[in-house]
Amino acid sequence: AYYEVAWNLASLLAIFGTSLAQTLFPTISQLDSEGDHEEVSSLVTDSLAYSGLFLIPGLVGGLMIGDIVLGVYGSEFKTATIVLPILIIARLIYAYEAQLISSLNAIGHPDTAFRVNLVFVSTNLGLNIVLVWLYGWVGAAVATATAALIGLILAYAALSQIITFEVPGREITYQWVASALMAAGIYGVDSVTVISISPVLDALVYVCLGTIVYFLALGVLSRQ
């Protein structure tokens, strides 16, 4: 139950990236069929730029106030604090992989996408068997994150051989910088204020504060 709650929170942060992949799929497919490869490359870059929009600050927030958010489900669920950041990392990596896999399918290479997914699933299963046996539920989270990283590397290598696209390093960096500023804001408020109203309200206050600081900072940093 603890692991499931942590996974659900991590998955909640990934909804935007999943929606992005599903939305762009028919557009990329149509542009590819029309031979507009330049626009396809541009959309792939844009999809990568926005995949971590919520997951990156979610990871930073999970490290800082994960126990407070998990406390909404009950004080005993704070036990999942140790796996929450690892699962968010796994979802973050997989969000980028999913965009690349979706692009492979959209441009008519489902066979390549299938092979990458097969490696991801096989690796995830194998690592889970070994790491769960050695380290328990923390091992399961590490296994998922590691398998996602391998899948991301393979998906990137496969897609980059078919089309030319840029990794939006600047936009991703802006998201990390904005997340760092968000963390500083949360830490500053937490160090001078003792918030203890109720688990739900405490979580809402911190999450709303973090959201405001993050998007204000990102809006200043990134014109895109």
Image: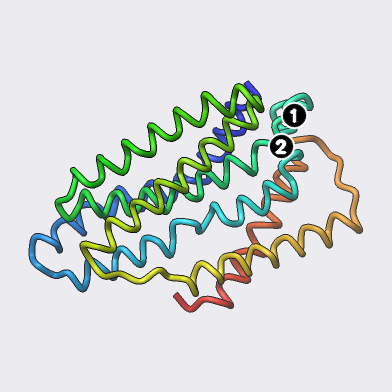
Residue 55, percent from left and from top: 54, 52
Q: Nearer the viewer, residue 152 or 133?
A: 133
Q: Residue at (70%, 45%) from the top-left corner?
A: 204
- Total number of numbered labels? 2
Dot 2: what SS? helix
Identify the image quadrant of residue 140. Answer: top right
Q: Left of 68 or right of it: where is 162?
A: left
Quarter placement of the C terminus: bottom left
Q: Residue at (69%, 62%) from the top-left corner?
A: 182
Reply above or below: 74 against 89: above
Q: Residue at (74%, 46%) from the top-left corner?
A: 65
Reply above or below: 24 against 112: below
Q: Residue furthest left?
A: 34
Q: Amino acid at mark 2?
A: Ile
Dot 1: what SS? helix
Q: Left of 7 or right of it: where is 200?
A: right
Check residue 224 in the rendering and tell me which mark sits there, or answer none: none
Reply above or below: 11 against 168: above
Q: Residue at (19%, 45%) from the top-left corner?
A: 110
Q: Nearer the viewer, residue 27 or 116?
A: 116
- The answer to whether the residue labelled 2 contacts the one labelled 1, judged by CB atoms less than 8 Å apart, is yes
Residue 46, percent from left and from top: 36, 66
Q: Residues within 10 Å of mark 1 (few under 14, many from 20)?
A: some
Residue 223, percent from left and from top: 48, 78
Q: Nearer the viewer, residue 128 or 184?
A: 128
In the picture of the structure, the residue carrying the numbered disc 1 is 79
Q: Amino acid at mark 1?
A: Thr
Residue 42, percent from left and from top: 29, 70
Q: Residues within 10 Å of mark 2 (few under 14, many from 20)?
A: some
Check residue 82 in the rendering and tell me which mark sits there, or answer none: 2
